[in-house]
């Protein structure tokens, strides 16, 4: 069992309260507070399930253990070492980062993308118990995407309560042209990070985008079947 934060009970109580807020529970966001989300390409997921651990990018790059990288070099260049030495997760699905990386794309399409070297052809999603992750002593979180120098790395229950949740959970259409709308994109990328590695004891669900991709994941796990 990992060591816990001294305010773990307050964190658990807040997550339950967040789930009961009217603007959260009246719609698809009603289940988001229960989970912390991690997505990566199907080839990476197979390795994760095989070893029973997620590792930081820093560690994986040292051992050449990252079959598919969905990170943009320009974005990673602005990310501090501590963050790159953590397992990175999100408070929600469908982040702006996922939008730019997701899907099988032609070389021409990638070249015209905002982040041409960020590519996650077949994303598979791991859903972790939020109360188990956020109460860990080796867990931090942010108020926006940690590739930005304006993002704050936070830790306590009070910090969690004071996050801009309506922006983090923002779930309607917008165009990121104004400062206010750019801030929404930044907040929707708010992260949860666990230092160095994370085992799968808090994993509650694995989600694929389609039945075909679920079958593909099963085949990758056991290609002889």
Image: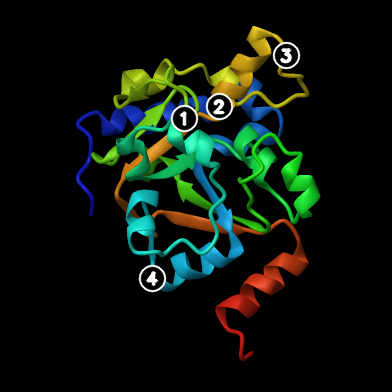
Q: Which of 127/10 is in front?
A: 127
In space, the residues marked 2 and 1 are separated at their CA atoms by: 31 Å
Numbered marks: total:
4
Which label's residue is closer to the chain start, 1 or 3? 1
Q: Name the residue under label 1.
A: 147
Viewer-side label of 3, 4:
3
Quarter occupied by the N terminus: bottom left
Viewer-side label of 4, 1:
1
Which label's residue is closer to the chain start, 3 or 4? 4
Q: Which of 59/6 is in front?
A: 59
Secondary structure type for disc 3: loop
Res. 157 image quadrant: top left
Which label's residue is closer to the chain start, 4 or 1? 4
**Residue 168 seen in the current view:** no
Q: Mark 4 points at which residue?
A: 51
Q: Position of residue 6 (x, y in %)?
A: 19, 31
């Amino acid at each position: 069992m990992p060591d816990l934060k001294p305010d773990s009970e307050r964190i658990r109580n807040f997550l339950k309260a967040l789930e009961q807020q009217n603007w959260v529970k009246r719609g698809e966001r009603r289940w988001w507070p229960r989970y912390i989300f991690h997505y990566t390409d199907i080839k990476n997921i197979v390795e994760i399930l095989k070893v029973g651990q997620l590792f930081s990018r820093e560690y994986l790059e040292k051992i050449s253990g990252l079959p598919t990288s969905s990170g943009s070099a320009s974005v990673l260049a602005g990310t501090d070492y501590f963050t790159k030495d953590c397992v990175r997760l999100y408070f929600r699905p469908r982040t702006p980062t996922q939008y730019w990386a997701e899907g099988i794309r032609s070389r021409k399409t990638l070249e015209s993308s905002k982040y041409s070297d960020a590519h996650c052809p077949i994303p598979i999603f791991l859903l972790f118990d939020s109360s188990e992750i956020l109460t860990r002593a080796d867990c931090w979180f942010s108020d926006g995407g940690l590739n930005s120098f304006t993002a704050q790395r936070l830790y306590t229950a009070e910090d969690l309560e004071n996050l801009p949740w309506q922006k983090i959970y923002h779930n309607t259409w917008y165009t990121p042209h104004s400062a206010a709308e750019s801030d929404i994109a930044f907040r929707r990328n708010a992260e949860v990070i666990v230092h160095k590695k994370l085992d799968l004891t808090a994993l509650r669900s694995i989600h694929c985008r389609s039945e075909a991709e679920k079958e593909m994941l099963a085949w990758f796990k056991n290609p002889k079947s």
